[in-house]
Amino acid sequence: MHKTMSALPRWGALALAVVMPAAGLLAGCAGSGERLANMVTPYRPEVVQGNVVTREQVDALRPGMSRQQVREILGTPLMTSLFHANRWEYVFTLRRQGVQDQARHLTVFFDKDRFERTEGDEMPTEQEFIASLSTSMKDVKVPELEATEAQLERFPKAQTETDKASPQPAAPPAGTRYPPLESPGR
């Protein structure tokens, strides 16, 4: 028993010799956890809610249209109310990481089941909406892309005149391709 009693102070001294420098190192790193947390941003999923309503769609509405005709142009409203049966609410929100949030609101009013008028935010054109999808708030530095002649030689040469004479599939008209609203990984 006498041996184990004398061993305790040595283990305590050894533990103290290990714990004290470790505590000193941690104290020296004070604030580095906060800096690390500020450097790492959590993933923010894309959130798309409601209907995208463009200026072209709103311009297509005419007084006297039926509710079904309005629905065919604008889509199903996000909100309808039993207490306000004479109006439909179209709300659109888009939240993406690195891009400014978008939110638009349009109220469509009816008089005896016939379209009367709209009120709300100014809707973007289709082209403005598409351009806003690719606009980023962050200043991303794009490196200059340069290829050497040796690197370019690895790729096939441009078509010859005989290749151009063969029928090619027709390209879709300009403005008919839209970027995906959801990430391709889904």
Image (tube, rainbow, N blue to C red):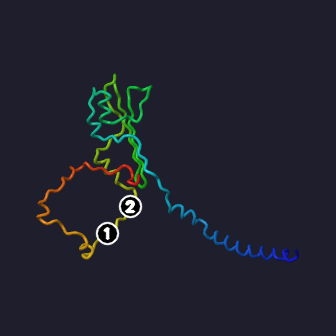
Residue type at tag 2: Asp
Image: 95 above or below 13: above
Q: From the viewer's perspective, tell me whether residue 153 is left or right of residue 90.
A: left
Q: Nearer the viewer, residue 91 or 67?
A: 67
Q: CA distance from mark 1 to mark 2?
A: 15 Å
Image: 32 above or below 64: below
- Count of labels in the image: 2
The residue that disc 2 covers is 139
Q: Nearer the viewer, residue 167 or 93?
A: 167
Q: From the viewer's perspective, tell me whether residue 69 is left or right of residue 9.
A: left
Secondary element at image label 2:
loop
Q: Residue at x 42, y 33 (%)?
A: 79
Mark 1 or 2 closer to N-term?
2
- Could you tell me residue 52's position as x and y percent? 35, 42
Crowding near the residue tagged with mark 1, few <14, some 14–19, many ≥20 C-alpha atoms within 10 Å: few
Q: Residue at x 88, y 74 (%)?
A: 1
- Could you tell me residue 162's position as x and y percent? 11, 64
Q: Residue at x 14, y 63 (%)?
A: 163
Secondary element at image label 1:
loop
The residue that disc 1 covers is 144
Within the image, what quadrant is residue 61 found in? top left
Q: From the viewer's perspective, tell me whether residue 72 is left or right of residue 24.
A: left
Find out whether the residues at labels 1 and 2 contact each other: C-beta distance under 8 Å: no
- Could you tell me residue 80's position as x and y percent? 41, 31
Residue type at tag 1: Glu
Q: Nearer the viewer, residue 165 or 33?
A: 165
Within the image, what quadrant is residue 51 found in? top left
Q: Nearer the viewer, residue 164 or 180?
A: 164
Image: 26 above or below 110: below
Crowding near the residue tagged with mark 2, few <14, some 14–19, many ≥20 C-alpha atoms within 10 Å: few
